[in-house]
Amino acid sequence: MSARVEVDLEKFAANLRRIRETVAPASHMLVVKDDAYGHGLPALVSRAVAEHVEWFGAFDVSTALEVRVHGGEGPRVLAWTVYDDSDIDAAMDASLELGIGDSALLARVIARARARGLSARVHLKIDTGLHRNGFRVEEWTQAVAQARDAAAAGLLRIVGVWSHIAEASESEDDAARAAFLDAAAALPEAPVMRHLAASAAAFARPEFRFDLVRIGAYAYGIRPEGGPPDAELGIRPIATLFGTVVQIDGEQAVLDVGSLDGLDSRLAGRLEVGTPEGPRALLAVTATAARVAGWPGARVGDDVALFGGRAPSSATDAAELVGTIGEQLVLRISPRLPRRYC
């Protein structure tokens, strides 16, 4: 078998159950941006629906529409990036929910709803200090009034209020939470959903969970840099990057995976990989191949686990060796490599 990513759907299901138990009574929104963090959206969404995940979060409308295809009509799906009016129309047609944090976008959504005689479902985003996007505090009162007027006219349904936090320090996050509570107080009417936390804050700080938490990385078993170990979190990496031996060159085994496939060349000389005879050093990474210290009986066709759930190092373990984060190491794996599910 050639280079590939193997994804363990049973571990994925176990992670989803762990998240659900941890954040209850809040609900879990499974974030599936970037093709479900590079794991393959169709298979992951299908399994998540089977595991009773009721909310999905997508970076953009096209991804949200893909969730609809593979997840059916039941789940609620939020998209928080809108590029043009066709996105707005597609979202309304597919009963998607839109994250809105800009007055011009809010006006465009209202205009499209009026033009089509439909009602758009929106989550209003307050900027609590991260400055990624969202209505600034000084804009919030006007934005809420604009949305309420549209809701009274049947053009909007305000179904959520949300934000991102920096997770830079507890004091900064506490300030963000206070700003979020002030903003949410302007929308007291039910059933407005409040959601602020992502993976790390959702696990570490119960007071940040509110009604809904947006968790992506933990669902795939990717823990944060410098954070608690997998065992403490109760999650496990679900994917493993495998290379296959294509040549024996003296005391080295040559694999069919290189930097063009997404294997970070900086890992050479730092990472131990999993061979049929145990851990061995990753010696070199070129554009199209990698070299590993050999082992007794090494032969062409042997599989080598480079990083992930079935390797000596998880994606985060490997990422910390080169000063980056596990998400980046996983997301850079080329989509050309097949994903195999087990």
Image: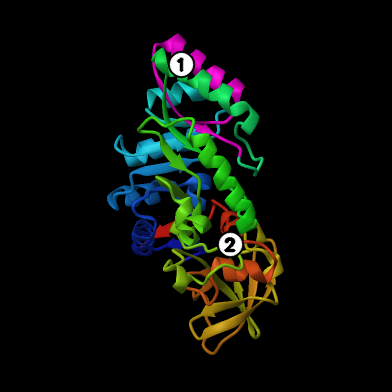
**Distance from Cα at disc 2 to Cα at disc 1:** 42 Å
- The amino acid sitting under disc 2 is Gly
Q: Is 70 placed left or right of 254 in the picture?
A: left
Between 179 and 281, the residue placed more toward the observer is: 179
Q: Name which residue lies at 45% across and 73% down.
A: 231
Q: Name which residue lies at 41% across and 12% down.
A: 153
Badge 2: how crowded within 10 Å, few (<14), some, or many (20+)?
A: many
Q: Is label 1 in a helix, a strand or a loop? A: helix
Residue 327: which quarter of the image? Answer: bottom right
Q: Earlier in the sequence, mark 2 or mark 1?
A: 1
Q: Is residue 78 above or below residue 157?
A: below
Between 244 and 36, the residue placed more toward the observer is: 36
Judging by the rendered image, the residue that carries numbered circle 1 is 150
From the top left corner, tell me how far across and down residue 304 is, in percent. Answer: 52, 74
- Judged by depth in the image, the label closer to the viewer, 2 or 1, is 1
Judging by the rendered image, the residue that carries numbered circle 2 is 326
Q: Is label 2 in a helix, a strand or a loop? A: helix
Q: Is 54 placed left or right of 258 in the picture?
A: left
Mark 2–mark 1 CB contact (< 8 Å):
no
Instruction: Read off the magenta span.
Output: 99-127
Q: Is residue 320 above or below residue 63?
A: below
- The amino acid sitting under disc 1 is Ala
Q: Looking at the image, how many numbered discs can be counted on the residues?
A: 2
From the top left corner, tell me how far across and down residue 114 is, in percent. Answer: 45, 11
Numbered tag placed on residue 102 in the rendering: none
Q: Is residue 68 magenta?
A: no
Between 331 and 157, the residue placed more toward the observer is: 157
From the top left corner, tell me how far across and down residue 53 is, in percent. Answer: 33, 48
Q: Name which residue lies at 40% across and 39% down.
A: 67
From the top left corner, tell me how far across and down residue 232 is, in percent. Answer: 46, 72
Q: Quadrant of the C terminus?
A: bottom left
Q: Is residue 115 magenta?
A: yes
